[in-house]
Image (cartoon, rainbow, N blue to C red):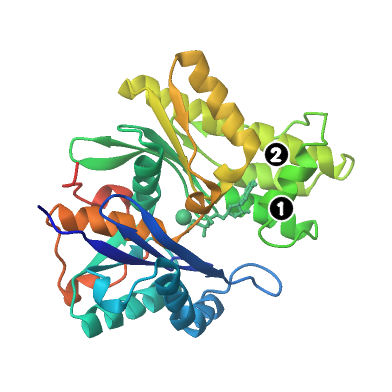
Amino acid sequence: MASREICLGIEGTAHTFGVGIADSDAKVLANEQSMYVPKEGGIHPREAANHHSEIAGQVIGDAMRKAGLSRKDITVIAFSQGPGLGPCLRTAATAARTLAISLDIPIIGVNHCIAHLEIGRAVCECSDPVLLYVSGGNTQVISYANGRYRVFGETLDIGLGNMLDKFGRDMGIAFPAGPRIEALASKGKKLVNLPYSVKGMDVSFSGMLTAAQQMKEESMEDICYSLQETSFSMLTEVTERAMAHLAKSEVLLGGGVVRNRRLAEMVGSMCADRGAKCFVPPPSLCSDNGAMIAWTGLIMHRAGVRMRLEDTGVLQRFRTDDVDVTWI
Ligand code: ATP
Ligand code: FE2
């Protein structure tokens, strides 16, 4: 019988320093985190990294206590190798290397976007989905084909979450602005005209951001409502087209923005119309989290992936389709 593997995963691509612990039954034993919130403006990478290094020891300790484990129970260490902000990635990688060396156990670098997909696939029990991954920094439509997760569509400029956060910042809404924009949007009634930018399978949001920032006459509720309706329709359109091209009948949502109920509702109704299924992981596993890194590291290790310390350098522009998916 294969022995039980337990992986501790460290997430640190951007504002969240997360530590998760998962076992080989896809059981999440712990998922602890601390988020860096800038005092004003956007994320400053160096400051976020300082936050991560200050709280790393504490979050690792919290996760171990939550899981009720001692250090010798951990059999693999995983960390978010990229894509993300250099200083944040390096801090998480350093914490992971330190643990792996001191415990004398293997270390695996994980692609952050793939981790969003793998944790969703495990907890929602879907098999071959199209992933709509929408976070602050990323907006991608991803699916498995011929040994790799391939990006079938993506943003040509900024991630949708960044767009919402930037709009929010201008309007005096604290970071992260998504939840407040969702609340305001629920009171909006009028659909105001905003650029609907779908180019083939790709989308772009900077034109919509500029147009919304320049609107003076409309109410905040109506602008937020229109931002959501327009951007979510764009994402629903490209997701549906990916499903049609690939003949796939499952959609999995991932990334912080899919905590938005209206987005899940729109993609869900598109799926219902096609006789397809839409899966939404619990909110704590949608946003950046350590559990998704732990679980992905664990399945990679089980599939025979091995990394030397020299292979664990961070990859700020780590592409989803750079990884050989040997575990499917
Ligand atoms: P990544 O590193 O993958 O780009 P991230 O650092 O942006 O991820 P996430 O936790 O995945 O982190 O996503 C955070 C984003 O999700 C923020 O932009 C935030 O405004 C947005 N968000 C959170 N809740 C909601 C919501 N209810 N509606 C819309 N957006 C939301
Ligand atoms: Fe993310």
Q: Secondary structure at mark 2?
A: helix
Which percent across, then down, holds residue 319? 32, 53
Q: Quadrant of residue 166?
A: bottom right
Q: Nearer the viewer, residue 248 or 58?
A: 58
For label 2, the crowd category at 10 Å Cα-Cα, with few meaning under 14, some 14 to 19 and many 20 or more, is many
What amino acid is labelled 2 in the image?
Leu
Left or right of 66? Residue 182 is right
What amino acid is labelled 1 in the image?
Phe
Q: Nearer the viewer, residue 288 or 88?
A: 288
Q: Residue 207 got which mark?
A: none
**Above or below 199: residue 47:** below
Q: Residue at x 31, y 24 (%)?
A: 246
Q: CA distance from mark 1 to mark 2?
A: 10 Å
Residue that badge 1 annotates: 167
Q: Residue at x 35, y 52 (%)?
A: 27
Quarter of the picture containing the C terminus is: top left
Tell me if I can see residue 195 in this picture: no
Q: Quadrant of residue 317?
A: bottom left
For label 1, the crowd category at 10 Å Cα-Cα, with few meaning under 14, some 14 to 19 and many 20 or more, is many
Which percent across, then down, holds residue 122? 34, 43
Residue that badge 2 annotates: 227
Q: Nearer the viewer, residue 197 or 117?
A: 117
